[in-house]
Image: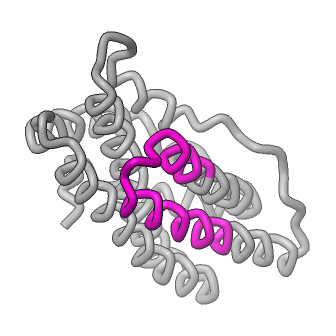
Amino acid sequence: MLKLKLDTDPVWVKMVVEGNISEILTDHAYCEQKAASSAISLLVHYPEYEELVTKMAELVREEMSHFQMVHKLIKDRGYTLGRERKDDYVNELQLFFKKGGQSREEVLAGKLLLFAMIEARSCERFLVLSENIEDKELADFYFNLMKSEARHYTMFLKFAHELCPNVDIATKWEAFLEYEAQVIGKRGVKETVHG
């Protein structure tokens, strides 16, 4: 379903577990907060799309509830929410989309495809984590969140196709999948969701 070009090596889970599990939980909490912020940005910048605004308002609530769930896990395990980390993966993905000289529709298409890709990779990472971690609570937690990420991924792709009819979404998405595989190929070495 995700059609990602490069799967996460389950060795990444071993590295996460042997490292400090609080690191990935903190990173995950901020990923949820950033997802909520991205949804707010879309509804603020594209208010003319009524269904997009409605869905983004719902998404903000959902992502912040996920933040609260991760934060509760952090507290319940005796950890403290650390400071926000820079997400090199997302920063590198953004380089795929050229800046300037684009129509409003092309900019929207880029944002929707970027958010779809982040959700797709998060979905894949959560599945790998749920299948390869011995901690039953975290395995169940990440399996359930994986389903939400899959829903978000398909929603963003659907909006890209519906709201950007003058952009060849299928071709752009295929090229973006190839680019993302190169980006994620350099990852898998840190205790972060996209690390």
Residue name at image x 39 percent, y 22 percent: 95
Tell me if 184 is positioned left or right of 164 in this view: right
Quadrant occupied by the N terminus = bottom left
Residue 191 in view:
no
Q: Quadrant of residue 119?
A: bottom left
Name the colouring of the figure. one colour
Q: Is residue 21 above or below residue 183?
A: below
**Residue 65 % position (x, y):** 67, 74
Question: In the image as oriented, which residue stretches furthest toward the top?
Answer: 101
Residue name at image x 70 percent, y 62 percent: 25
Q: Is residue 186 above or below residue 70?
A: above
Q: Quadrant of residue 172?
A: top left
Q: Is residue 7 above or below residue 64?
A: above
**Residue 82 % position (x, y):** 84, 51
Tell me if 188 is positioned left or right of 1 in this view: right
Question: In the image as oriented, which residue stretches furthest toward the front?
Answer: 48
Magenta stretch contains residue 60: yes
Q: Quadrant of residue 136?
A: bottom right
Tell me if 175 is positioned left or right of 190 in this view: left
Residue name at image x 15 percent, y 34 percent: 167
Residue 183 in view:
yes
**Residue 9 % position (x, y):** 37, 55
Q: Nearer the viewer, residue 75 or 46?
A: 46
Residue name at image x 46 percent, y 68 percent: 126
Tell me if 20 is positioned left or right of 90 in this view: right
**Residue 60 % position (x, y):** 59, 63
Q: Which residues are magenta?
A: 37-66
Main secondary structure found in the magenta portion: helix
Magenta stretch contains residue 29: no
